[in-house]
Image: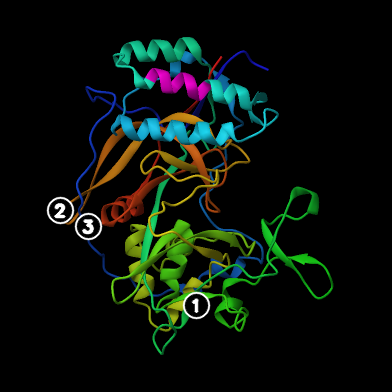
């Protein structure tokens, strides 16, 4: 085991980050425009016909293994968000490790670090960031007390991808009608959370009539009534694409016509791999690149085709109702911090690590978005079915129109540094 560790995940060559303070105030609230819908070429798409059952379809750049690099690679610790959110993020992460056994470990670049090491890491960072050290002095402290690890793409570009996610809001009704035919479902009683000992390559499933553990019903079967009659319908929507949006974001506000609402959070999946319908339609030539917000609007306008297009993604998420005043929870079982919690692939990057993220982000402005460099401290609090490999990061934006606009437009390369104390 190394005597110390600080982790870097390379996503892009560093850009210039030049804010005077290491933390800064938040942004204004503005919305974005909708592009025109292109022509339909889906039926003749060879990529679609070649997809096999159980096969995913999403961005997953090839990557090298995480490896140790010199501490001199750590940039100035600038932060474009406020200090309060950072301290909250660190305390949330510390609470996670305080509730794990001392024997719990994470692995980075072949090195192993236990829960007590992670607790010391977070306590040290809380002390540092509670101080008013100039950023140059803060950088000296970080370099002196931590090592650096790096993971980068092995595709010839050295780039990996940062995207955004947020707490969605969709319009629903309490009962079905001629328009609202698609349900947000509670988890079925026969849903099984799998373990490595079960020897399957999916996260959730069910036992079939032969006693074999299989994936639960795909989206198309659920649309055809596979879950009907079990009392699993939480609310109803007019659009299967809106439900898919809620499922991709993992949490959301379900808004009724009278203005009342409930909050819903992740409660399992059907075990099928995630397929990006947007990437499929781009690769098939049906749609150009656009923000995810605009893509969902495109799907919602497709009439009878909408269900078929949503069915291209077989993965289906089940929900449970959460308290109205609650925040979305991450995979660490604690509330996410907007702007600071990130989702990662836990097969490559452990949950519960603090770090520094640098990239370019969209900023809602007028009728569209502009892009600016950003740098901020974060923590690995969540996972996502579309986040695969150490070269993928999903940044949680929070809720509201600005979060929707900016998170939906976020797709950029950057750098991620993860920290572990000596």
| Residue identifier under label 3 | 31
> Considering the numbered disc 2 on the image, is that residue within a helix, a strand or a loop?
loop
Q: Is residue 295 left or right of residue 264?
A: left
The front one of 78 and 157 is: 78
- Residue furthest out toward the left: 366
Alpha-carbon distance for marks 1 and 2?
34 Å
Mark 2, Cα crowd under 10 Å, few <14 / some 14-19 / many 20+, is few
Q: In x, y percent, where is residue 302?
A: 37, 78
Q: Main secondary structure of the magenta part?
A: helix
Q: Residue at x 50, y 77 (%)?
A: 308
Q: Tell me the quarter of the picture where residue 96 sits.
A: top right
Alpha-carbon distance for marks 3 and 2?
7 Å
Magenta-tinted stretch: 121-128
Q: Is residue 72 left or right of residue 112?
A: left
Looking at the image, do the residues carrying marks 1 and 3 touch, with CB atoms under 8 Å apart?
A: no
Q: Residue at x 67, y 25 (%)?
A: 110
Q: In x, y percent, where is residue 377?
A: 39, 30
Q: In the rendered view, would you say 185 is above or below 145?
A: below
| Residue identifier under label 2 | 366
> Considering the numbered disc 1 on the image, is that residue within a helix, a strand or a loop?
helix
Going from the N terminus, do you reach mark 3 or mark 2 first? 3
Looking at the image, do the residues carrying marks 1 and 2 touch, with CB atoms under 8 Å apart?
A: no
The front one of 42 and 400 is: 400
Q: Tell me the quarter of the picture where residue 295 sits.
A: bottom left
> Considering the numbered disc 3 on the image, is that residue within a helix, a strand or a loop?
loop
Q: Residue at x 34, y 76 (%)?
A: 301
The numbered mark at residue 308 is 1
Q: Is the N terminus in the top left, top right, bottom left or bottom right quadrant? A: top right
Going from the N terminus, do you reach mark 1 or mark 3 first? 3
Alpha-carbon distance for marks 1 and 3?
29 Å
Going from the N terminus, do you reach mark 1 or mark 2 first? 1
Mark 1, Cα crowd under 10 Å, few <14 / some 14-19 / many 20+, is some
């Amino acid at each position: 085991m190394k005597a110390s560790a600080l982790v870097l995940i390379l996503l892009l060559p560093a850009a210039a980050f030049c804010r005077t303070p290491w933390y800064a105030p938040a942004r204004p609230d503005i919305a974005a425009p909708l592009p025109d819908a292109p022509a339909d070429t889906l039926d003749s798409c060879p990529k679609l016909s070649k997809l096999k059952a159980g096969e995913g379809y999403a961005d997953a750049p090839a990557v090298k293994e995480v490896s140790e690099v010199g501490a001199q690679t750590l940039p100035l610790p600038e932060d474009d968000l406020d200090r309060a959110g950072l301290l909250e993020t660190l305390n949330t992460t510390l609470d996670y490790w305080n509730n794990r056994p001392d024997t719990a470990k994470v692995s980075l670049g072949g090195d192993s670090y236990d829960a007590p090491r992670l607790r010391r890491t977070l306590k040290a960072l809380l002390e540092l960031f509670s101080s008013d050290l100039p950023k140059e002095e803060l950088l000296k402290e970080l370099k002196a007390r931590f090592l650096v690890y790096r993971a980068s793409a092995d595709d010839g570009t050295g780039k990996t991808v940062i995207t955004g996610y947020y707490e969605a809001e969709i319009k629903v009704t309490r009962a079905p009608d001629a328009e609202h035919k698609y349900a947000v479902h509670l988890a079925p009683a026969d849903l099984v959370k799998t373990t490595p000992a079960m020897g399957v390559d999916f996260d959730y499933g069910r036992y079939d009539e032969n006693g074999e553990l299989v994936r639960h019903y795909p989206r198309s079967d659920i649309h055809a009534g596979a879950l009907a009659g079990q009392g699993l319908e939480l609310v109803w929507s007019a659009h299967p694409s809106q439900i898919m949006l809620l499922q991709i974001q993992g949490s959301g506000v379900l808004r009724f016509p009278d203005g009342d609402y409930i909050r819903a959070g992740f409660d399992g999946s059907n075990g099928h791999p995630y397929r990006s319908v947007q990437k499929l339609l781009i690769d098939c030539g049906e749609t150009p690149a656009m923000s995810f917000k605009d893509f969902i609007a495109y799907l919602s306008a497709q009439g009878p085709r909408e269900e078929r297009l949503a069915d291209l993604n077989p993965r289906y998420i089940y929900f449970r109702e959460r308290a109205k005043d609650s925040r979305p929870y991450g995979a660490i079982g604690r509330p996410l911090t907007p702007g600071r919690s990130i989702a990662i692939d836990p097969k490559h990057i452990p949950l519960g690590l603090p770090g520094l993220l640098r990239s370019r982000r969209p900023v809602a402005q007028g009728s569209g978005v502009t892009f600016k460099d950003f740098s901020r401290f974060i923590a690995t609090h969540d996972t996502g079915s579309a986040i695969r490999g150490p070269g993928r990061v999903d940044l949680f934006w929070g809720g509201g129109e600005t979060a929707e606009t900016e998170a939906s437009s976020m797709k950029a390369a950057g750098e991620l540094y993860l920290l572990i104390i000596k």
